Image (spheres, rainbow, N blue to C red):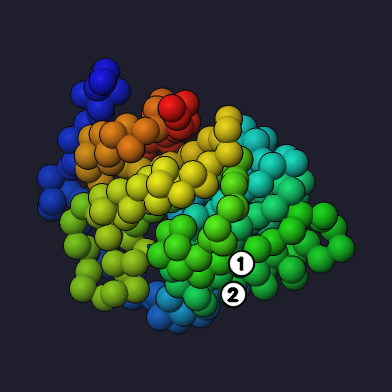
Amino acid sequence: MDRSLVNELPPPLPPEQILAVNPPRKDLHTTRSYAWNGWDFEVPPGVFLPGGTSRMIHQRILDGDIDVRGRRYAAMGVGLGVEAVAAGVRGAEEVYAADVHGPSVGTAARNFTRLLEGRTDTRLVPVVGDVFEGFPDGVRVDVVTFNPPAVSQAVSTDPDVVRNVCVGASITEKFFTQLGERSLLAPGGEVFLIVSNTADLRRIVAHAEDTGFRAEVHHRHDWGDGVLTYLFRLREDARG
Ligand SMILES: C[S@@+](CC[C@H](N)C(=O)[O-])C[C@H]1O[C@@H](n2cnc3c(N)ncnc32)[C@H](O)[C@@H]1O
């Protein structure tokens, strides 16, 4: 297999630099708020507060660069649900609002209903489970996004911080393994995965390729502090 993309990707930053760019947040267990695109979101304890990396996906859904119109969309690791709301505005057919954290899924569903009630025909399907485990058999989706907690260093021992930020490459390995084994991606489907060099990019992309996905760099952002964020677009190799 041609590993040129894998070999082009940078190695993980040194551990001390990863810790420096991911300082522990002290407010995760409080109720916070988040405003974006004229929408106000309540962020209950334990739910991830979106940052610049999150917005790289949210904005592209809203702009149509990540095309969800009329499509079945899985918002994996949905957190408080900004991407689900953006997909509702863009006219997705269905949005699977999926997260391992039940309170995040409940928050995403509440935000979707509160902000879009009567203004969208998009059907929201809340799913709680470890990546795709909660998806009913037979479901197929056309688009998947995931901003995974793939940071390769444990930046905290708090299990909620780990779940949100630093599970490591095993999270995307489970994601691609389940996606492939259960044939959850419809023909022509696209996966948008966002990860930076605070994670092991080479291991993540190599595993996705070994599982039958072809990756390309859809967008790359240099934050100017050593962190390089890659938005990968992946498609499944034709089976058979
Ligand atoms: C970095 S946050 C992203 C949240 C939101 N999508 C955003 O971009 O603002 C990662 C999310 O993945 C969820 N998560 C962690 N492990 C997961 C798993 N095994 N299955 C599904 N979701 C998971 C976390 O609960 C969290 O909401």
What is the total number of numbered labels drawn onto the structure image?
A: 2
Residue at the (65%, 36%) spot, across then down: 67
Q: Are marks 1 and 2 in contact (CB under 8 Å)?
A: yes
For numbered disc 1, what is the local secondary structure? strand
Q: Which mark is residue 106?
A: 2
Query: Circle 1 sits on which residue?
Result: 126
Q: Is residue 133 above or below residue 205?
A: below
Residue 221, position as x, y percentages in the image = 40, 33
In the rendered structure, the answer to whether residue 214 lies left or right of residue 65 reads left
Residue, x 53% and y 35% (percent of image)? 190
Instruction: Give how far apart the Cα atoms at labels 1 and 2 are.
Output: 8 Å
Residue 72 against residue 222 in the figure, above or below: below
Q: Secondary structure at mark 2?
A: helix
Amino acid carrying mark 1 in the image? Pro
Residue 20 in which image quadrant? bottom left
Whether residue 34 is visible to the viewer of this picture, yes or no, is: no
Looking at the rendered structure, the kind of residue marked 2 is: Gly
